[in-house]
């Protein structure tokens, strides 16, 4: 909202400069976004008087005239049709500047012209170029025109918060300044001269929708002369962003900007039946507004109607058929209070936002309606020559009751953290035009004024005290904060686990916890947890495993042409327990299908397999420091491949399974080479190392020895590693399997496993003799186990 500083000073004393005033308002909670200096586009233009006028000897449309200021006279050529003797005019003598163009003495059609009599358009004060600008008779001769018209000003761009509808006016901002500074507030003059005619003879008002329109007032004016508004009013409207139209309409807009109360003027002779009815529209009705557009209404749109039909959309815009025109002689002046909720809804439905609806939607003082109406009527009497019928039609079926808030000063002091004296407290509230009454218990009943509908609770009063005291005057103290909650061990573990798996290129999925009993039969799950009230038969049991859900997602993607898949799920499964509540266990499910390493232009892709998935698990176990406690052993499960399945044990306890899906199930699901793993993360979490100790890099080089062992074909690699670990080999850093071979020249029923032993000493470089000592001890352990060494 634009607020001219000169207008503001009519209501409150402002000694500060515009920037300082903007700072005061902003610190008081009314943000001033910008302060803009405005002024005329001309220099040196003065107030002159036309002494005499005579015809131009060489042109029929031009006149010669003598213009005087307070010192000398000028001979001027002028072609304005409204030029007359005795007029006070805007005169640009030689040397004056109009839009950076300097006025000079020159001849026009043979006659000397010493200056120029200006129109408003030439002065860039308006678009009116129909004639010269005529000033009031009391304009001081020779005075600077810009100073006389008050063209030098400052505009404050104010942006009140949505709950402060009372600040959407010049008077509202002045009221805030008066309260913040503790200075008097001046009320604009209202001089009502009423005629003997009674307003009730000309209009009756009925409100059929009191919830949407709690109050409606009307005044009747006659003998109105519609014409241009005085220049000062037009200038203020323009500087506030509104277009001047005529004196009647301009006055309604002027009072709206001044008081924040939207008004509307109807051409009384276009109204039918001497009646105004405020009611809701019918769904599907249409109405043509002042902008010439036809609007389709619904059953919640509030309409202002005469005896035969609608004439305005309540609180938003008037109708085209009842607008004020040049020939208008009688005016019905509306000033009403409309419900903010009703206006907001209609604005949204009709997609029609106006200055009036902007104010009504944020809330207008219901007690302001007759006051604003009186102010507008007094201006119409003065500037439109109107006569006013006696009285006002004021329909207010349910007057608003003043709010009453019980306030404890001690509570306010504790809330704000500052000391507030009782006299200071009462003074602040009275500055804000609040009623204050002290109770016998030492508390206070506070009655906010009708325009402060945002004040409802004790904390609102505390905020007002802080505003007037000044937020910048409240000492800064560090807040006493509760310590932030520490992330739980489980949450941190799961977060890190997901990061690792996503780093492998897996995508997380989330599936339903409900499954079909038929889908579980194929996996050999006989004991399941049935739902008492399932959504459907297909979702009637709680899942005992993540694997069915993973396979369903794989099947869904395969049916849509996606053959390469890496997915995981970290969710709960539900296991029935006899005579106990079901057990909920958090598990990790992994699935690989198709290529694990995608093809690119230099290399063909590689398919995922048992060992790729096993490697992913080992990387996870290593990250959490439990790899040394993990072992993989054969397992027979109906849903896994008979020769490509393993159980995962942590210190001898089974925590999961790993393997390829049984080929029969692959055929049933129409999938190819699917590898799965399911791990209980709860046991993994228990053993995971929270703090990893840094181990320095080795100072001395190490070496390695390869050991090829001939074992029976059914012996697992894990068994060989366990034998070597148990032998307590000296200098052993780690072991790796580098080869596993079956076939000639290896005897039938045997296989060769080659283990690489990495050896290192911490205090010096290991020698060959020391390395061979460790190798020999490994050979002895192998032979004790009944195996032979392959040379």
Image: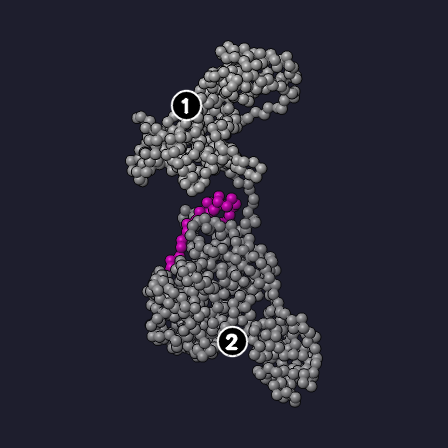
What's the magenta region?
399-423
Image quadrant of residue 367? bottom left
Q: Earlier in the sequence, mark 1 or mark 2?
A: 2
Given residues 155 and 537, the one toward you in this image is 537
Q: Residues within 10 Å of mark 2 (few under 14, many from 20)?
A: some
Given residues 618 and 347, the one toward you in this image is 618
Q: Residues within 10 Å of mark 1 (few under 14, many from 20)?
A: some
Q: Is residue 774 left or right of residue 388?
A: right
Q: Is residue 758 visible?
A: yes
Q: How is the image coloured?
A: one colour
Q: Residue 101 location, x and y as percent? A: 67, 73
Q: Is residue 365 magenta?
A: no
Say which residue appears at 70% left-offset and 80% top-offset: 105
Say which residue appears at 55% left-offset and 53% top-offset: 27
Image quadrant of residue 647? top left
Q: Residue 112 location, x and y as percent? A: 69, 84
Given residues 536 and 149, the one toward you in this image is 536
Q: Is residue 441 left or right of residue 39?
A: left
Name the residue tied to disc 1.
635
Name the residue tied to disc 2.
228
Vertical comparison of 420 with 220: above or below: above
Q: Residue 699 location, x and y as percent? A: 65, 21
Q: Residue 94 location, x and y as percent? A: 69, 77
SS of the residue at dot 1?
Answer: loop
Q: Is residue 31 left or right of residue 347?
A: right
Q: Is residue 415 magenta?
A: yes
Find the residue positioned furthest to the bottom: 57
Give the position of the C terminus as an image quadrant: top right
Q: How far is the residue under mark 1 from the one under mark 2?
A: 99 Å
Please name which of the two marks, 1 or 2, marks the residue nearer to the observer.
1
Vertical comparison of 544 with 302: above or below: above
Image quadrant of residue 217? bottom left
């Amino acid at each position: 909202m634009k607020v001219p500083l000169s207008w503001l000073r009519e209501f409150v004393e402002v000694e500060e400069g515009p920037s300082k005033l903007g700072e005061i308002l902003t610190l008081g909670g009314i943000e001033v976004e910008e302060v803009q200096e405005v002024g005329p586009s001309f220099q040196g233009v003065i107030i002159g008087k036309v002494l005499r006028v005579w015809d131009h000897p060489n042109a029929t449309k031009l006149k010669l005239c003598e213009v005087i200021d307070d010192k000398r006279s000028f001979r001027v050529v002028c072609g304005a049709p409204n030029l007359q003797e005795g007029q006070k005019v805007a005169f640009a003598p030689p040397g004056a500047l109009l839009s950076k163009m300097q006025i000079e003495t020159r001849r026009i059609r043979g006659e000397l012209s010493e200056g120029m009599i200006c129109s408003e358009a030439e002065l860039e004060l308006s678009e009116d170029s129909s004639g010269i600008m005529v000033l009031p008779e009391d304009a001081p001769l020779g005075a600077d025109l810009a100073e006389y018209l008050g063209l030098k000003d400052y505009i404050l761009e104010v942006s009140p918060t949505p709950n402060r509808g009372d600040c959407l006016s010049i008077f509202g901002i002045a009221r805030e300044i008066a309260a913040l500074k503790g200075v008097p507030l001046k009320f604009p003059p209202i001089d009502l001269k009423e005629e003997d005619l009674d307003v009730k003879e000309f209009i009756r008002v009925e409100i059929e929708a009191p919830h949407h329109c709690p109050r409606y007032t009307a005044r009747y004016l006659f003998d109105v002369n519609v014409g241009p508004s005085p220049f000062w009013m037009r200038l203020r409207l323009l500087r506030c962003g509104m277009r001047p139209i005529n004196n009647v309409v301009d006055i309604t807009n002027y009072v709206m900007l001044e008081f924040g109360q939207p008004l509307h003027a109807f051409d009384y002779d276009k109204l039918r039946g001497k009646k105004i009815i405020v009611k809701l529209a019918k769904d599907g009705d249409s109405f043509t507004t002042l902008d010439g557009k036809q609007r389709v209404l619904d059953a919640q749109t509030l309409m202002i109607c005469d005896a035969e039909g609608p004439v305005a959309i309540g609180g938003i815009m008037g109708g085209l058929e009842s607008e004020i025109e040049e020939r208008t002689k009688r005016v019905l002046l509306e000033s009403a209070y409309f419900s903010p909720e009703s206006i907001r809804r209609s604005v949204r439905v009709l997609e029609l936002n106006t200055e009036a609806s902007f104010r009504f939607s944020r809330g207008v003082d219901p007690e302001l309606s007759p006051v604003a109406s009186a102010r507008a009527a007094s201006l119409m009497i003065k500037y439109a020559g109107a006569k006013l019928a006696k009285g006002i039609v004021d329909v207010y079926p349910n007057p608003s009751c003043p709010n009453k808030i019980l306030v404890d000063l001690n509570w306010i002091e504790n809330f704000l953290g500052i000391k507030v004296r009782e006299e200071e407290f009462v003074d602040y509230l009275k500055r804000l035009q609040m009623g204050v009454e002290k109770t016998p218990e030492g508390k206070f009943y506070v009655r906010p004024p009708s325009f402060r509908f945002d004040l409802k609770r004790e904390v609102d009063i505390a905020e007002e005290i802080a505003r007037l005291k000044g937020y910048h005057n409240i000492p800064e103290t560090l807040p006493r904060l509760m310590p932030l909650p520490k992330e739980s061990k489980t949450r941190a573990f799961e977060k890190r686990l997901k990061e690792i798996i996503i780093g492998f290129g897996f995508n997380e999925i989330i599936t339903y916890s409900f499954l079909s009993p038929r889908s579980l039969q194929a996996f050999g799950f006989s004991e399941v947890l049935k739902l008492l009230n399932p959504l459907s038969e297909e979702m009637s049991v709680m899942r005992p495993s993540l694997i069915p859900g993973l396979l369903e997602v794989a099947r869904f993607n395969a049916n849509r042409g996606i053959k390469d898949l890496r997915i995981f799920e970290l969710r709960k499964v539900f296991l029935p327990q006899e005579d106990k509540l079901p057990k909920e266990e958090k598990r990790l499910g992994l699935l690989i299908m198709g290529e694990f390493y995608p093809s690119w232009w230099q290399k063909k892709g590689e398919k995922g397999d048992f060992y790729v998935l096993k490697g992913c698990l080992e990387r996870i176990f290593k990250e959490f420091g439990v790899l040394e406690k993990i072992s993989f052993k054969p397992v027979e499960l109906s849903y896994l491949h008979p020769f490509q399945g393993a159980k995962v044990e942590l210190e001898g306890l089974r925590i999961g399974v790993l393997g390829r899906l049984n080929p029969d199930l692959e055929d049933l699901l129409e999938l190819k080479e699917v590898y799965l793993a399911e791990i209980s993360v709860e046991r993994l979490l228990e053993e995971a190392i929270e703090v990893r100790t840094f181990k320095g890099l080795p100072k001395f080089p190490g070496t390695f020895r390869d050991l090829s062992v001939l074992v029976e074909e059914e012996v697992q690699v894990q068994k060989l590693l366990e034998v070597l670990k148990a032998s307590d080999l000296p200098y052993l850093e780690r072991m790796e399997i580098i080869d596993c071979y079956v076939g000639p020249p290896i005897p039938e029923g045997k296989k060769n496993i080659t283990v690489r032993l990495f050896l290192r000493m911490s205090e010096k470089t290991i020698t060959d003799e020391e390395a061979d000592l460790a190798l020999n001890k490994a050979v002895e352990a192998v032979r004790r186990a009944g195996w032979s060494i392959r040379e």
